[in-house]
Image (cartoon, rainbow, N blue to C red):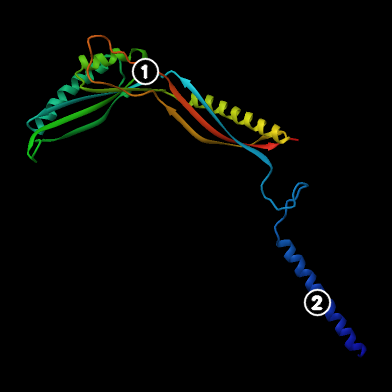
């Protein structure tokens, strides 16, 4: 082989090798990074930590009673039923306001006017009109006397009451703090069993928050004695999820 041919062949070989090296570097740069520690040789993108959930319930005495008071009228015509209902409702509203209920705490929850049919035909026998008022009563301990006044003096014929909290945020915050403490206690127990330490909190999430009031009370008619309505308690429940890192 002549010297000129040998030089060309050598140059070509060097160029090919250089191209292969560059291609290998490009492929390597596009591969995902592998996280490897002493305990494993498998790839992972998740950080080490302890994930737990915590639950808590706080119990509060209700400070708000929501009273639903209804009135109705049945007459031969829709206009007569509506007119009679208006007079009865005016009497009920006047009695409610005389108890000290502010305008912002009194509203209409429902209003209906419609025909009444015979038991075995499509014949209209009368017309019925009804209205349901919603009243917020802030002194829950005296709600029994309030119900008596609305029924006996206000003429309400369909009445019920349920209890709750005017502002549940503080109770929720208290329950959430207790739930996070519960999650931390679980994390410490798990860390102790695994022979590691609990580090700082990485993430906290609310899984659920609920407020469960006492059972609703229905009052058909007011007796001669003062109506007794036990207040009970409100259950405020919170569930959280807490992600802890591993301590050193």
Which residue: 81% across, 73% down? Answer: 18
Q: Residue 97, relative to residue 20: is it above or below?
A: above
Kindly identify the residue that appears in the image at 19 percent across and 22 percent down. Answer: 90
Residue 234 left/right relative to 193: left
Q: Can you tell which mark lies on residue 111?
A: none
Q: Most extreme residue toward the right, as rendered? A: 3
Taking depth in this image into account, of 99 and 214 the one nearest to the observer is: 214
Left or right: residue 84 versus residue 210 is left
**Quarter of the image that includes the N terminus:** bottom right
Q: Which residue is mark 2?
A: 16
Disc 2 is placed on an element classified as helix
Is residue 193 at least partly visible in the picture?
A: yes
Task: From the image, tell me which residue sits under label 1.
Answer: 138
Which type of secondary structure does the marked residue at label 1 adopt?
Answer: loop
Residue at the bottom extreme of this rendering = 2
Q: Quadrant of the image for the C terminus?
A: top right
């Amino acid at each position: 082989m002549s010297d000129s041919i040998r030089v060309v062949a050598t140059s070509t070989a060097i160029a090919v090798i250089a191209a292969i090296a560059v291609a290998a570097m490009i492929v390597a740069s596009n591969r995902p990074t592998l996280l490897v520690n002493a305990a494993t040789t498998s790839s992972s993108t998740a950080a080490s930590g302890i994930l737990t959930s915590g639950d808590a319930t706080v119990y509060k005495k209700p400070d708000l009673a929501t009273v639903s008071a209804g009135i109705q009228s049945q007459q031969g015509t829709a206009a007569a039923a509506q007119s009679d209902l208006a007079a009865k409702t005016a009497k009920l509203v006047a009695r409610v306001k005389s108890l000290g209920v502010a305008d912002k705490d009194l509203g209409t929850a429902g209003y209906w006017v419609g025909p009444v049919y015979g038991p075995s035909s499509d014949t209209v026998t009368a017309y019925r009109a009804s209205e349901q008022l919603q009243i917020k009563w802030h002194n829950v301990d005296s709600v029994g006397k309030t119900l008596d006044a609305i029924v006996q003096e206000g003429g309400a014929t369909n009445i019920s009451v349920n209890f709750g909290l005017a502002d549940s945020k503080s109770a929720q915050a208290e329950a959430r703090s207790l739930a996070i403490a519960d999650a931390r206690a679980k994390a410490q127990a798990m860390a102790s069993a695994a022979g590691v330490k609990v580090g700082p909190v990485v993430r906290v999430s609310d899984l659920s928050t609920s407020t469960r009031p006492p059972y609703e009370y229905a009052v058909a008619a007011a007796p001669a004695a003062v109506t007794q309505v036990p207040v009970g308690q409100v259950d405020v429940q919170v569930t959280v999820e807490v992600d802890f890192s591993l301590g050193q």
